[in-house]
Image (cartoon, grey):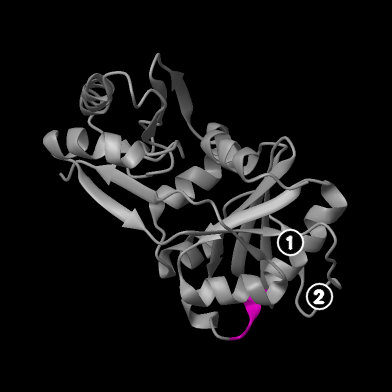
Amino acid sequence: MFNVDKMLSHELSFYELFTNKVTTEYGIIYCNPLNPLSWDSNHAHIFQVDNHPELAIQNIVAFYQSRGIVPRIFPSFIYDELSKLRPHLECRGFTLTILNDEFMFFPHQSSLALDTTLPVRKITHISDDIIELIHTGDAGDWTINLLKNAINHENFHLLGLFQHDRCVAIASVQVMDGYSRIDNVVTHLAFRWQHFGTQLINYLVSYHAALSCNYLYLFANNPIAIRLYKNVGFQTVMINKPCWNAHIPV
């Protein structure tokens, strides 16, 4: 049975595939000095929110600043963590952003017919057309570096939808223990509004079903993307915890 808490625990470990993990007495720190602009690759989670969190925040700031990286903190989805951390974050100069992220999962009982209107292939290297595709969206070199770090891992699958041998959309799925997470969904700016994203996600769901019996989940905050996922068959997950991030502006 799908379990929200298990999904969120996988959300905390999702980043291990493409960055370095440091376990501390108060939580975990993710860091990749070779990809400093990537928020996913460089952020911390605080688990001990009732035990001097100001010391944890102080240590996190020192850790990243000593490496020339912006200090960033993501939620740990602990009850009431934001109200306990907020005054200490603001005191240290963090900018706090509340996000409208919507978590969604694909029900096991649902099924899709494989859409083969355009060919979809697993991507094994980041080619020039994929780099161009990423640069036309909201992503940048930090996403390219992240994909390069993850692409050869056996549990990471990057799929590309092609038109005339040109990659026009990408999406990834990372297979974990019981849960798999969709990410890096990007359609080339010149090819949007042609339902390529819908076709690729349809294919990805069927591809994953042949690969694993895991629950498939994702999160989104763009209303257009949310509507796309719901049309494919994803359902909203109520986590009853705020989504946020905090960073110290440069």
Q: Is residue 6 visible?
A: yes
In this rendering, would 167 be left or right of 199? left
Q: Is residue 197 magenta?
A: yes
Q: Nearer the viewer, residue 99 or 205?
A: 99
Label 1 close to label 2 by CB (< 8 Å) = no
> Residue at left 46%, top 59%?
101
Give the CA distance from mark 1 to mark 2.
10 Å
Residue indicated by mark 1: 204
Residue 196 in the image, given as x and y percentages of width and height: 64, 77
Give neighbour class at mark 1: few <14, some 14-19, many 20+ (Cα, 10 Å).
Answer: many
Region of the chain picked out in magenta, as a range? 194-198
Q: Crowding at label 2, few (<14), some or many (≥20) Cα neighbours within 10 Å?
A: some
Where residue 91 appears, x then y in whole percent? 12, 35
Going by the image, does 67 lie left or right of 176?
left
> Of the residues shown, which amino acid type is indicated by label 2?
Asp
Q: Tell me if residue 167 can be seen.
A: no
Residue at x 46%, y 40% (from the top left corner): 77
Q: Is residue 217 left or right of residue 192?
A: right
SS of the residue under disc 1: helix
Q: Which mark is residue 215?
A: none
Q: Quadrant of the C terminus?
A: top left
* Front residue (pair 59, 170): 59
Residue 166 point in image, percent of width and height: 63, 72
Q: Which of the 4 image quadrants contains residue 42?
A: top left
Which disc is residue 115 wearing?
Answer: 2
Residue type, numbered disc 1? Leu
